[in-house]
Image (cartoon, helix red, strand yellow):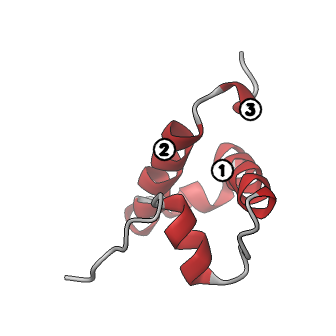
Amino acid sequence: MKSLDHYDLDELKLVYLTLHAALPDNPQLMDSELLQALQTYLQQMAKSANVDVSHHGQWAHWLNNGVVLKRV
């Protein structure tokens, strides 16, 4: 199996966002080692791009490739 750094970053972001969105209906994902590893990796990539991952807005903006999400 390939390590996370061998996958396309945008693809990893999409997978993370999809899994994260599924948390309310699948709370067992909170304990998922895969989700935790993916989040840790993405946070490392964001930090290397000078994103403050402790600031939710910056983190979300980076995850969404600069697309501003609107609440409905």
**Category of crowding for the residue at label 1, using alpha-carbon neighbours closer than 10 angstroms: few (below 14), some (14–19), many (at least 20):** few
Q: CA distance from mark 1 to mark 3?
A: 19 Å
Residue 57 lies, in percent from the top left, at 55, 82
Residue for point 76% across, 55% down: 40
What secondary structure is marked by label 1? loop
Q: From the viewer's perspective, is the residue at label 1 or at label 3 nearer?
A: 3
Q: Which residue is mark 2?
A: 15
Residue 20 lies, in percent from the top left, at 49, 60
Q: Which residue is mark 1?
A: 32
Q: CA distance from mark 1 to mark 2?
A: 14 Å
Residue 19 lies, in percent from the top left, at 47, 52
Q: Amino acid at mark 3?
A: Asp
Q: Amino acid at mark 1?
A: Ser
What secondary structure is marked by label 3? helix
Residue for point 80% across, 57% down: 48
Q: Amino acid at mark 2?
A: Val
Q: Which residue is mark 3?
A: 5
Residue 37 falls left or right of residue 71: right
Looking at the image, is 36 positioned above or below residue 11?
below
